[in-house]
Amino acid sequence: MINLLKKILNNNSSEDEIDYNKNLELLAGLMIEAAYTDGQIDNSELDKIKLSLVNVFDERPKEVDLVLEEAVKNKNNSKSLHHYTSYINKNFNDNKKILLIETLWEIVLSDGEVHDFEANLIRRLAGLLYISDVNSGNARKRALDKNKN
């Protein structure tokens, strides 16, 4: 985060790079938020977050490692859901938002149990991202199917 601010202030970075970093930070922050809703983050959840960011959202592995490390350190300084969802609504299409909900379900399912707080968080996020209950439910089913494999 500090490096991103330095780049912005020094004007050494293109707008695309700033957008890339912002997307990655928000995705990682939101995924850590979902994983930490039950009060702990398991290694299985961290592994799933990293794999999702790299394989599903096409983020760079080295950048993912750095941003995740920072997000875990700052997990207790969480931002409001509005902070995440307002940016996502402006910058993500519907398919990418549904993919995000599916990924969040995969993350909370990766430790083998879904706590009420985790399910509630994803339901609230789906609403704030204007994702229908049907699409959210289908995303959960796909995540459950992936988790069984």
Image (cartoon, helix red, strand yellow):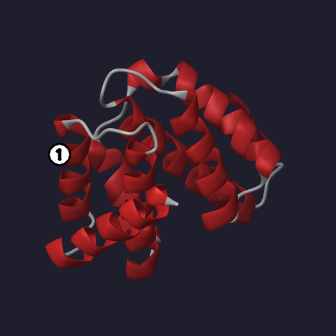
**What residue do we see at 61% from left, 66% from top?**
56
Three-letter residue code for mark 1: Asn
108 lies above or below 72: below
67 lies above or below 128: above
- Dot 1: few (<14), some (14–19), or many (≥20) neighbours within 10 Å? few
Q: Quadrant of the N terminus?
A: top right
The percent position of residue 22, horizontal first and vertical second, equals 58, 51
* Number of marks: 1
Q: Secondary structure at mark 1?
A: helix
Residue 11 seen in this snapshot: no
**What residue do we see at 26% from left, 52% from top?**
122
In the picture as drawn, the residue positioned furthest to the front comes out as 149
The percent position of residue 76, horizontal first and vertical second, equals 40, 19
Q: Nearer the viewer, residue 109 or 124?
A: 109
The percent position of residue 108, horizontal first and vertical second, equals 38, 44
Q: Nearer the viewer, residue 44 or 4?
A: 44
Q: Quadrant of residue 125?
A: bottom left
Residue 51 seen in this snapshot: yes
104 lies above or below 91: above
99 lies above or below 14: below
**Is residue 100 rendered to the left or right of residue 64?**
left
The percent position of residue 131, horizontal first and vertical second, equals 24, 72
**Is residue 149 rendered to the left or right of residue 56?**
left
**What residue do we see at 23% from left, 36% from top?**
115
**What residue do we see at 63% from left, 35% from top?**
68
**Is residue 102 rendered to the left or right of residue 140?**
right
Q: Nearer the viewer, residue 91 or 128?
A: 128
Which residue bears the numbered disc 1? 120
